[in-house]
C-alpha cells in the first residue's frame, strides 16, 4: 500500500506548535516512504472560523520547509480540499448510514439537551445521549418522525453505537486499544444546519482521499472508537492510526498560553530559524538516537519512524529551543544568513557593506541567540552613539585607568597592520615592558570601545572596528573624563 497521509487542521485559529508537530510528523513520514502528504482544511465549524487562519497555516508550513502534494492551494485528484466545499458528499454518506440503520435522526432542542445533561450531572453519571428517552426516531416512532420531517423540523443525524461489546483498534504508538461500546456516545454526524461534524467528515474524506495512515494528536484518541464504528458501518478498510503524545508545559500540565506563546508565528517573529524550530519540534516525542540533537530536514526524513514515537508527553523547554537556535546561528554559513541580516539591519536604518556585515556576524554570533540581536548587542559596530554600561565602568575604571589607557594610545596609533594578531603582540610587549597586569587595561579598553562588559575577543573587536574608530573613541573618552 502506498503511503498517503494528511494534515487536517481547522481554521479556528493560527497554527500552534502542536499543530506544527503534527504537520511535520506527517510530512516526515510521507517523505521517508516516498508517499504523498495532503493538506485538508476541516472548516465545518463555521461558528469558530477565524479570518486568515488558513493562510497562516499554509504560510507557516511553507516557512518550515513543508510543501504539500495536494491542498486547497494546489488542488489534486481528490479535491475539493476544504470540507465546507464537500457538504453534498457528507449528506450522501449520512443518508447511507440511515438506510443501513447505522444512524438515526434526533429532533431534540438545545434546551432539551441541556436538561438531559443536568439530570445526568445530578445523578452523578457521565453525560451521554440516550436515544431511548430523548426525542429520537426510536421514541417518536415512524409516524411522528414523518410528520416532523414533513413540517421541516430541525434534526441532526446521530451514530447508532452498539449497546454492548468492545471496539478495538491498533495504534502504532500505543498498541492495541480496547473500548467498551457502552462508554461511547451516539455522536452527532450531521448537524441540523446540514454541516457534518468532524467525525463523519474526517472518516469520509480519509476514505475517499485514500489515506493510509492517520497521524494526529493524542486528544483525538477518544474519538477513534467512533471512527472505527463508521469504517465498519460503511464496510471500508481502516487506515493505520498513530496518536502523538501531548506537548507539556514545564510543570507537566498540557501546553497552554499560560506559559507564553504557543503559536508558531510567534516563534518566527521572535527570530527563531525555521530549521531550528523544525529540529526542536521533531524531537518533541521522537528521537532516533541519543548521541546527537542537531539534524537537517533531510536527516529527519531519512531517520523518521512512527515506531520510535514515545507515548509519554513531551515537555516544551523554551531554553532548549533557544540553545538549539544558537547552535544553528553559530554553525551556519554566514553567506547564507547575509540576506536576512541585511534585512534586519535595514529595519534599524543601518547600512553596511556585505563583507563587513558578514565579518560582524562571524565575530558576534558566539555571544547571541538570535540574528536579530545584532543591531542591539553590536550597536557599537555601527555607530559611535552607543551607551556605556555604568555598572561596568564603575567596577573597572580606577584612578590609574586614565594614565594606563593614555600610555597605551600611542601603541595603537603606531600599528601599521591593524589586525588582531598585531594588536595582541604590540599590547603584550607594552604590558611586559611596563609591568601592567592585563586586567587593568582590557576591561577599561573594552568599556571605552564597546560600552559592554561582554563581547567577542577584544583584539578581534578592535580589528573589526578599525584603527581610526578605535583611536577616535579612546581620545573622545579620555577627553570627556578629563573634564
Image (tube, rainbow, N blue to C red):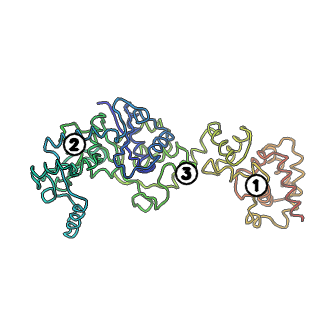
Relative image position of residue 250 (x, y in whole percent):
45, 60
* Residue projecting furthest to the front: 151
Q: Which residue is drawn at 79% across and 43% down?
A: 419
Tell me the quarter of the picture where residue 392 sits. bottom right
Tell me the quarter of the picture where residue 483 sits. bottom right
> How far is mark 3 from mark 1, CA to CA?
25 Å
Label disc, if present, on residue 105 of the rendered structure? none
Residue situated in front as seen by the camera: 257 or 118:
118
Residue situated in front as seen by the camera: 273 or 204:
204
Is residue 32 shown left or right of residue 429? left
Q: Tag 1: Cα neighbours inside 10 Å, few (<14), some, or many (≥20)?
A: many
> How far is mark 1 from mark 2, CA to CA?
71 Å
Residue situated in front as seen by the camera: 360 or 331:
360
CB contact under 8 Å: marks 2 and 3:
no
State whether residue 129 is above or below residue 70: below
Q: Is mark 2 on a helix, strand or loop?
A: helix
Q: Report which residue position mark 2 lands on.
A: 94
Relative image position of residue 452 (x, y in whole percent):
72, 58
Q: Report which residue position mark 3 lands on.
A: 323
Q: Which of marks 3 and 1 is nearer the N terminus?
A: 3
Front disc: 1 or 2 = 2
Q: Report which residue position mark 1 lands on.
A: 450
Q: Tag 2: Cα neighbours inside 10 Å, few (<14), some, or many (≥20)?
A: many
Q: Residue at x 16, y 43 (%)?
A: 98
Amino acid at each position: 500500500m502506498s503511503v498517503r497521509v494528511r494534515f487536517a487542521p481547522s481554521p479556528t485559529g493560527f497554527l500552534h506548535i502542536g499543530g506544527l508537530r503534527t504537520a511535520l510528523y506527517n510530512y516526515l513520514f510521507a517523505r521517508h516512504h516516498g508517499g504523498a502528504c495532503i493538506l485538508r482544511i476541516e472548516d465545518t465549524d463555521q461558528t469558530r472560523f477565524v479570518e486568515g487562519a488558513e493562510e497562516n497555516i499554509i504560510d507557516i508550513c511553507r516557512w518550515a520547509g513543508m510543501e504539500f502534494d495536494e491542498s486547497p492551494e494546489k488542488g489534486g485528484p481528490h479535491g475539493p480540499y476544504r470540507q465546507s466545499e464537500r457538504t453534498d458528499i457528507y449528506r450522501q454518506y449520512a443518508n447511507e448510514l440511515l438506510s443501513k440503520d447505522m444512524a438515526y435522526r434526533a429532533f431534540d432542542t438545545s434546551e432539551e439537551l441541556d436538561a438531559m445533561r443536568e439530570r445526568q450531572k445530578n445523578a452523578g453519571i457521565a453525560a451521554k445521549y440516550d436515544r431511548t428517552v430523548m426525542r429520537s426516531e426510536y421514541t417518536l416512532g415512524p409516524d411522528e418522525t414523518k410528520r416532523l420531517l414533513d413540517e421541516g423540523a430541525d434534526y441532526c443525524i446521530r451514530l447508532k453505537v452498539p449497546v454492548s461489546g468492545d471496539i478495538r483498534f491498533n495504534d502504532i504508538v500505543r498498541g492495541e486499544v480496547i473500548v467498551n461500546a457502552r462508554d461511547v456516545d451516539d455522536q452527532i454526524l450531521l448537524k441540523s444546519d446540514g454541516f457534518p461534524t468532524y467525525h463523519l467528515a474526517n472518516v469520509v474524506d480519509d476514505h475517499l482521499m485514500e489515506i493510509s495512515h492517520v497521524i494526529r494528536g493524542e486528544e483525538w484518541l477518544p474519538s477513534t472508537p467512533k471512527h472505527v464504528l463508521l469504517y465498519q458501518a460503511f464496510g471500508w478498510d481502516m487506515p493505520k492510526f498513530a496518536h502523538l503524545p501531548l506537548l507539556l508545559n514545564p510543570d507537566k500540565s498540557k501546553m497552554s498560553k499560560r506559559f507564553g506563546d504557543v503559536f508558531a508565528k510567534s516563534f518566527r517573529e521572535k527570530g527563531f530559524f525555521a530549521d531550528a524550530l523544525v529540529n526542536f519540534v521533531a524531537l518533541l516525542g521522537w528521537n532516533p538516537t541519543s548521541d546527537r540533537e542537531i539534524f537537517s530536514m533531510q536527516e529527519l526524513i531519512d531517520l523518521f519512524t512512527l515506531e520510535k514515537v514515545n507515548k509519554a508527553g513531551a515537555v516544551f523547554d523554551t531554553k532548549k529551543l533557544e540553545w538549539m537556535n544558537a547552535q544553528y546561528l553559530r554553525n551556519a554559513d554566514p553567506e547564507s544568513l547575509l540576506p536576512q541580516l541585511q534585512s534586519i539591519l535595514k529595519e534599524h536604518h543601518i547600512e553596511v557593506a556585505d563583507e563587513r556585515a558578514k565579518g560582524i556576524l562571524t565575530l558576534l554570533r558566539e555571544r547571541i541567540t538570535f540574528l536579530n540581536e545584532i543591531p542591539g548587542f553590536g550597536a557599537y559596530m555601527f555607530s559611535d552613539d552607543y551607551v556605556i554600561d555604568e555598572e561596568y565602568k564603575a567596577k573597572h575604571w580606577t584612578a590609574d585607568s586614565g594614565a594606563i589607557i593614555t600610555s597605551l594610545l600611542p601603541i595603537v596609533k603606531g600599528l601599521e597592520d591593524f589586525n588582531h594578531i598585531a594588536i595582541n603582540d604590540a599590547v603584550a610587549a607594552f604590558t611586559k615592558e611596563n609591568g601592567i597586569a592585563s586586567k587593568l587595561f582590557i576591561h577599561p579598553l573594552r568599556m571605552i570601545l564597546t560600552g559592554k562588559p561582554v563581547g567577542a575577543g577584544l583584539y578581534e573587536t578592535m580589528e573589526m572596528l578599525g584603527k581610526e574608530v578605535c583611536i577616535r573613541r579612546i581620545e573622545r573618552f579620555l577627553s570627556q573624563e578629563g573634564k
